[in-house]
Image: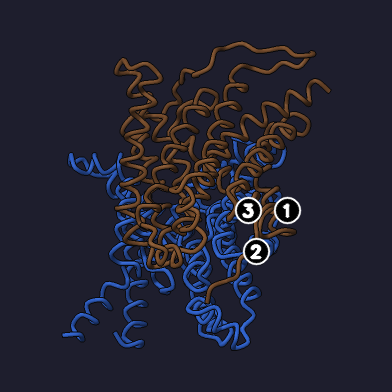
Amino acid sequence: MSPRAGTIALVAALGFVAFAAAYLKRSDVYLLTLYCVYLMATMGLNLTVGYAGQMSLGQAAFFGIGAYHAAILLKLGWPFFVVLPGAAVACFVVGLALGFPALRVQHHYLAFATLGFNVLVYLVMRNEEKITGGTYGISAIPRPTVLGFDLGGHLAYFYFTLASLVALGLLLWWLLRSPWGRAFAALRDNPIRAESLGVNITAYTLLAFAIGAACAGVGGVYFASLVEFIEPGPFHFSTSLTMLLAVIVGGSGRFFGPAIGTAIIVLLPELLRGSSAPWLKFMQTWYLAVFGVAVVALMVWLPGGLLSIPERFKRKGAAR
Amino acid sequence: MGELVQLIVSGIATGAIYALAALGFTLLWQASGTINFAQGEFVTLPAFAMLLCIAAGAPLWLAFLITCAAAMVVLGWGFKRVIVDPLIRHGVIPLVIATLGLSIVLKTLVRAGYSAEAHQFASPFPAGQLSIAGVNVSYADIGTLFLAGVIVVGLQAFVTRTVTGRAMQAVAQNTDAARVLGIDVKRMVLYTFLINAVLAVIAALLVTPTYLAKFDMGDSIGQKAFFAAIIGGFNQTRGALVGGVLIGVLENVVGFYVSPAYKEGVALMLFLVVILFRPEGLLGKAEERKV
């Protein structure tokens, strides 16, 4: 597909979703909004995993930091457009502080550091009852009013989230097309060569990781306002793991990879839940196991992720 | 004072269990460059296998032996054959991802296939405690320390004193040179996987009576194993031991004097401090990066 046709198709698809949402059930609109929110976090993670080539197992922690940050400040009556950049900056700074020691050493150390960090953040959420409400969480989180529009309705909030997602997507797209973003790809493909060409590997990787964390923080803000009640559960380490695998299944390092991967972890389980066919009942219980097996199989047969399938066919055709 | 000694002794016992899991983790890394993110689930699975055997009427020792055999086949040979062999030539990352996927599979397998509840697990050691000069130490801690000690010393002796052990070390140090010298590299790597599986079963036997058998019990022990391995030094077998014991003791001390709620965070803090000041680990040697 040529770039222009791709753009047209994308705009048409977005327009269709926006149009169709008006006729969907309330719960479906909620699910679509949830999808957009998670996609913000996984798109950020794709930057870390796909473009900078680092494993991060702490995306849910940053997602949670954003969510708690928003829940606490929105309840204090702070305006949404102050809270939002605040969450991004907070996650960015925490990301820098966490990434710095880990990235000085080796690739996989970031995976361990982020994993431990996620456990620690989860503990803080659960134990610091005065701030986070502990296991009871924080309820009655308000939805924002933007430029005089009340976004309390489910449809209005969906449109707002979708528009924000598109804005974030454009921002990341621009970032990756800039010379600065191209350095990311260079260091993923061949770090030693990139270094010899004058790319400061550690600085770029660290920045990619911190920007990815900031995206998760932004997603967390929208999440808090969407669900209106947060507790530590959704920010457990297992969410980080699912997010990472979603990025990889979709095709890490491909701009639209997370869109596919996130659909598999957010939309597909809900579709299965709605059905009553016996094999689908089986799938509900074993969904994660099947997902895990699929990940292993994917690594063995299709390391590029689902979005690499067309290329693979193309290459086979060319070889003949 | 007696309090502190007690905390340290039981901390060393817990740390010895972490060390067993960490030891397998380090061995796999040295011999084959495998980073196994499902190491925690490699402990969970044997715990439930033993529960199944006991439910079928087997005594604990028989359950342990059956599980050891099964683990060597499934978690040793099977894991190597199905997941590691096809992926290892693609480098570290795909294998890391595959083992992450595997950890989800195994966890769901236990939760959906057995149960989501925590289960009691009989201790191989008698209940009660021993009092020496006002310090109380439970028999379980003594037994754990003894058993873990025997295994670590035995493994060390095997690796340094026997021909097979030395061949394994040679493979870990330089695979190509070992092959040139006529060592059957594939077989040595397989041995490492088998040893890792058995170590996991022993860790399960020791840890489950206190931590209970639960589908996500591996999360915590797996993490401690990674951190212990890195803190001690990834390329040193003794490092795993030092790291494990250090984490076990500090967790106990922090849990008692600071806050029990943050016990789980101790390993991460220690890890961050160590990699900040001594990235190769406390006992490790710095490694050159391969181009």
Q: Which tint was used for chain B? A: brown
- Whether residues under marks 1 and 2 lie with C-beta atoms below 8 angstroms apart, the answer is no
Residue type for callout 3 = Gly
Q: Residues within 10 Å of mark 1 (few under 14, many from 20)?
A: few
Residue type for callout 1 = Val
Chain letter for the residue marked with disc 3 in the picture: B
Chain letter for the residue marked with disc 1 in the picture: B
- For disc 3, the marked residue is B233
Query: Where is residue B15 drawn, in percent x and y?
Result: 62, 35
Residue at mark 3 shares a chain with residue at mark 1: yes
Residue sitting at 18 percent across and 39 percent down?
A278
Question: The residue tagged with tag 2: helix, strand or loop?
Answer: loop
Q: Which of the marked residues, 3 or 2, is nearer the chain's N terminus?
A: 3
Q: Which of the marked residues, 1 or 2, is nearer the chain's N terminus?
A: 1
Q: CA distance from mark 1 to mark 2?
A: 17 Å
Chain letter for the residue marked with disc 2 in the picture: B
Classify residue A123 by image quadrant: top right
Q: Residues within 10 Å of mark 2 (few under 14, many from 20)?
A: few
Query: Where is residue B80 drawn, in percent x and y?
Result: 35, 51
What is the image's colouring? by chain
Classify residue A304 by image quadrant: bottom left
Q: Is residue A72 toward the left or the right of residue A243 in the image?
A: right
Above or below — where is A247 with respect to B163?
Answer: below
Residue sitting at 67 percent across and 55 percent down?
B281
- For disc 2, the marked residue is B286
Q: CA distance from mark 3 to mark 2?
A: 9 Å
Residue sitting at 55 percent across and 65 percent down?
A107
Above or below — where is B46 with respect to A245?
Answer: above
